Image (tube, grey):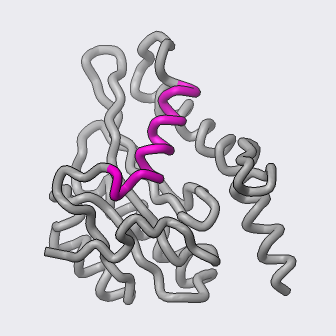
């Protein structure tokens, strides 16, 4: 089994060093479901990529991973660790091989230990609390659109006190400029 490289050490001093991912499920109208797989940067809480699908298939995790790898090739200064739970997607040979081919460390939570992935669980909680719970169910396409809009809002506008009152992207761009 892949070891837990993070061991709940969620702090990092630079972007794209430690990422975390997971899948969450939403109910839609007509007994449909929407599955969301975001990739969250532990540096600033930014969602660097994400995928949605009607079923939790392998492409749901591989497509955001490909987007993340493209970003890492352009911007990463250090070797990246991606942390997940032990879901079958993250143990699949295609996922593991892609991480290895791109020199990305794999980290996995221990079984039945959701606190090992607390930042992602926290993001899911915020997302659902702020735009899903208490709202009437909508179609898959409408919910997908709302989630895309929320993630844009979350990354660009939603301030966090621990980021000096800035949004995740404001924080990343202001800290990268001050490092120059």
* 134 on left or right of 155: left
- Give the residue at x 24% y 81%: 97
Foreground of the two, 89 or 107:
107
Q: Is residue 128 magenta?
A: yes
Q: Count every numbered label the image shows and give the total.
A: 0
Name the dominant secondary structure of the magenta segment. Answer: helix
Q: Where is residue 122? Give x, y as percent.
A: 47, 44
- Give the residue at x 86% y 78%: 178
In the figure, 153 relative to 71: above or below?
Answer: above
Query: Is residue 67 in view from this perspective?
Result: no
In the figure, 69 relative to 100: above or below?
Answer: above
The N terminus - image quarter: bottom left
Q: Where is residue 124? Give x, y as percent.
A: 45, 40
In the figure, 129 relative to 57: above or below?
Answer: above
* 76 on left or right of 160: left
The C terminus - image quarter: bottom right
| Residue 66 image-quadrant placement | bottom left
Range of residues picked out in magenta: 115-131
- Give the residue at x 57% y 73%: 12
* 138 on left or right of 59: right
Foreground of the two, 125 or 66:
125
- Give the residue at x 34% y 52%: 115
| Residue 171 image-quadrant placement | bottom right
* 111 on left or right of 21: left
Q: Where is residue 131? Give x, y as percent.
A: 56, 26
| Residue 83 image-quadrant placement | bottom left
């Amino acid at each position: 089994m892949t070891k837990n490289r993070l061991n709940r050490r969620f702090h990092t001093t630079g972007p794209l060093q430690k990422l975390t991912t997971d899948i969450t499920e939403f109910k839609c109208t007509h007994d449909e479901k929407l599955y969301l797989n975001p990739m969250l940067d532990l540096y600033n809480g930014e969602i660097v990529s994400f995928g949605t699908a009607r079923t939790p298939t392998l492409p749901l995790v591989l497509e955001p991973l490909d987007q993340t790898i493209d970003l890492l090739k352009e911007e990463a200064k250090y070797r990246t660790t991606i942390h997940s739970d032990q879901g079958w997607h993250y143990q699949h040979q295609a996922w593991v091989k892609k991480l290895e081919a791109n020199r990305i460390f794999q980290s996995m939570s221990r079984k039945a230990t959701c606190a090992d992935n607390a930042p992602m669980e926290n993001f899911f909680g915020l997302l659902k609390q702020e735009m899903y719970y208490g709202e009437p169910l909508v179609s898959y396409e409408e919910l997908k659109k709302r989630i895309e809009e929320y993630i844009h809002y979350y990354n660009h506008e939603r301030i966090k006190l621990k980021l000096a009152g800035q949004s995740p992207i404001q924080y990343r761009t202001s800290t990268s400029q001050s490092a120059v």
